Image (tube, rainbow, N blue to C red):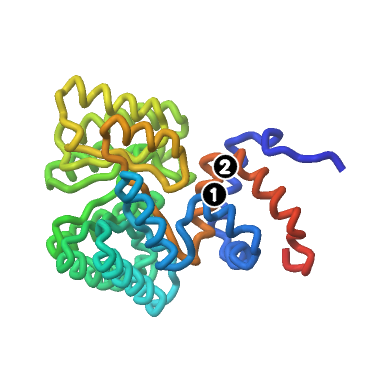
Amino acid sequence: MPSTSTREIPEHALRTLLLALSHQRALGEAAVRIPVTRPMVGRFVAGQSLPEALEVLERIRDEGFVATVDVLGESVSSVDAAEAAAGRYLETLDALAARGLERNVSMKLTQMGLDIGHDVARDNVARILRKAEELDAFVRIDMEDHTKTDATLALWREVRPIHPATGIVVQSALRRTEADVDAINAERGRVRLCKGAYNEPASVAYPDKADVDRAYARIAEKLLRDGDQPAFATHDTAMINHVIRFARAERIDRDRFEFQMLYGVRRDLQERLMRAGYRVRLYVPYGTQWYPYYMRRLAERPANVLFMLRAMTREGFGRDGRG
């Protein structure tokens, strides 16, 4: 049988497939049981337990980086699961404080129960924000696919008075984002700008990468001029260079913004920016619910899929009939 390479599959089609697979709960439940997945996932995930994550965070701090912690999980389907997820964030914040680590976390609203009901998510987020206010921590609410944008912004605005140091994420892929950023800047909200990792319809998102990039550059300029401590989440050197050039031209000090990158991605670029004097914050996820996150990372770089498939084949994936 001839071998198959990911290069034989159009990259866009493979990315679409991987994003679709990221939503398959049954595949996720099977994947976490395969021992070979652990070292591969470890490239992007700082362990499955809080103690493992704390060790990684201490190493990152010693290397000169700052971090934000994501307790992995999303799209919970019960109130109990949402409350348990909020409890893991409370535990994480307490542990960060106890270890003398920076208290900075990121969370998804579907993990807090948004798909169950607005009130469920609001109450769980409020619990976390009260803890963050007590510990002088920073909380960032992640953005999910476009169907959640209005609800996410509305809930962020509703709970922000509990703890004003609560930020939000926007995606340059969405056509609406420039207007959203104008409103958030007027409210002095703290924004993380990313491109967007979801497969969105052309009616709401730019279908071409070049348009997404142009939107990213325009929004970055708005945030540098008028934003409050904006964070630029990208591994794209063209976007990073645009931010740096614009900041220099406008005489914007380096301490007024930061770059954010995913743990395990473009470590060479992370180190180069840090050595150049820029603040680089790593997005550090941990937990057992790593499958959707990991699949989205593969979708961003489909060439990694071949490595994953070869490793799984060597371990005899599917020999028990469940593969």
Q: Position of residue 173 (x, y in %)?
A: 39, 38
Q: Position of residue 316 (x, y in %)?
A: 77, 59
* Above or below for 172 versus 162: above
Q: In the rendered image, is residue 36 in sight?
A: yes
Within 10 angstroms of label 2, few (less than 14), some, or many (20 or more) residues?
Answer: many
Q: Tell me the kind of residue under disc 2.
A: Arg
Q: Residue at x 55, y 55 (%)?
A: 41
Q: Quadrant of the N terminus?
A: top right
* Above or below for 198 versus 74: above
Q: Tell me the kind of residue under disc 1.
A: Leu
Q: Which residue is mark 1?
A: 19
Q: Position of residue 276 (x, y in %)?
A: 30, 30
Which residue is at the far top?
Answer: 249
Closest to the observer: 96 or 310?
Answer: 96
Report, in whole angstroms, how far the alpha carbon at label 2 lies from the one at label 1. 6 Å
Q: Residue at x 46, y 38 (%)?
A: 266
Q: Residue at x 61, y 38 (%)?
A: 303
Q: Quadrant of the C terminus?
A: bottom right
Q: In the rendered image, is residue 176 in sight?
A: no
Q: Which residue is mark 2?
A: 15
173 to the left or right of 305: left
Q: Are marks 2 and 1 in contact (CB under 8 Å)?
A: yes
* Above or below for 262 versus 74: above
Question: Which quarter of the figure has residue 156?
Answer: bottom left
179 to the left or right of 301: left
Within 10 angstroms of label 1, few (less than 14), some, or many (20 or more) residues?
Answer: many
